[in-house]
Amino acid sequence: MGYKNLIDCHSHSNFSRDGKECIENMCQSAYEKGIKVYAITDHCECDLFKSDGYESSTQQSLEKLIELKKEYKEKMKVLVGIELGQPLENTNATNIILSRNYDYVIGSLHRAKGLSDYYFINYKSYSKEKLENLIKKYFEGLLEIAKWNKFDTLAHLTYPLRYIKDNGIDIDISIYDDIIKEIFKTVIQNKKAIEVNTSGLRQSVKKLLPDYKYIKMYKDLGGKYITIGSDSHNSDDVCKGIQEGLEVIKQAGFEYITYFEKREAKFLKIE
């Protein structure tokens, strides 16, 4: 390994509630690490748009990113991004976000309707059947977002695994392969991307989200567009796991990584 075309298209500044550092620090860290294409994608949990202040925080993030995109123009490509969580839960909020001047929109699901974020669930209290139904509900929700089709990349396909493993529980998600294939086929038909999220390498699950099996499944089904991101919430984690992620993506048969600028797919050779 030792890829020179480094790219990180998923990160959060302190305009996200769980972000730790300002956008300036995040961009400076990306530049110092030799990243060629970098996106900050602060959170917008659409179902909490008004109540939790996302209407204001996303606007502030947007304005600062537009400034930094100009500032870094000769040094590094900075993309103006957003991560839309639960975009179908509040379509008015979603439409406000989509009317803004973003380069790049991530679609994600952090909580199933009526439930807490998967981060907060006490999985040890769940029976095997209840846990399997919970994860099934997650993939069904992802499929609905895939069909909605107003994002650029679908984030961290196996997101709940981060937190299930934190609870010391192992689950075989192959029982959901049929619906995962349906998600992939929908994404492929709509010419959207899936994301390889490297945060799992830093967490107890110790794998990419999704891992090689599902990256290869996506490729074999005809997948062309694939993004990668560290999901960093502090400057130290910017670009963490990107080298390893690019290696696995290349092993799965991809020659190019995808990013989006002005909502159009662009490609960077994996080399």
Image (cartoon, rainbow, N blue to C red):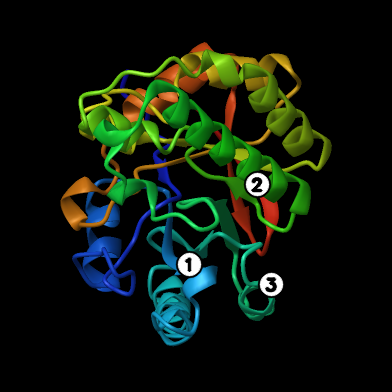
Name the mark nearer the viewer: 1 or 2. 1
Name the mark nearer the viewer: 2 or 3. 3
> Viewed as shown, does residue 259 lie left or right of 16?
right
Residue density around tag 3, few if under 14, some if 14–19, many if 20 or more, within 10 Å: few
Question: Which numbered disc, 3 or 1, marks the residue that appears first in the sequence?
Answer: 1
Residue pointed to by mark 1: 45
Q: Looking at the picture, how far across and down is residue 8, in whole percent? A: 40, 46
Element on which disc 1 rests: strand
**Nearer to me, 195 or 246:** 195
Q: Looking at the picture, how far across and down is residue 78, in whole percent? A: 45, 62
Q: Looking at the picture, how far across and down is residue 257, in whole percent? A: 56, 34
Residue pointed to by mark 3: 91
Residues at circles 2 and 3 in contact by the CB criterion of under 8 Å: no
Residue pointed to by mark 2: 266
Amino acid marked by disc 3: Thr
Amino acid marked by disc 1: Glu
**Nearer to me, 117 or 199:** 117
Q: Looking at the picture, how far across and down is residue 221, in whole percent? A: 74, 18
> Viewed as shown, does residue 171 lie left or right of 23?
right
Give the residue displayed 27% in from the left and 35% down from the top. 125
Can you say which quadrant of the picture contains the N terminus? Answer: top left
Amino acid marked by disc 2: Lys
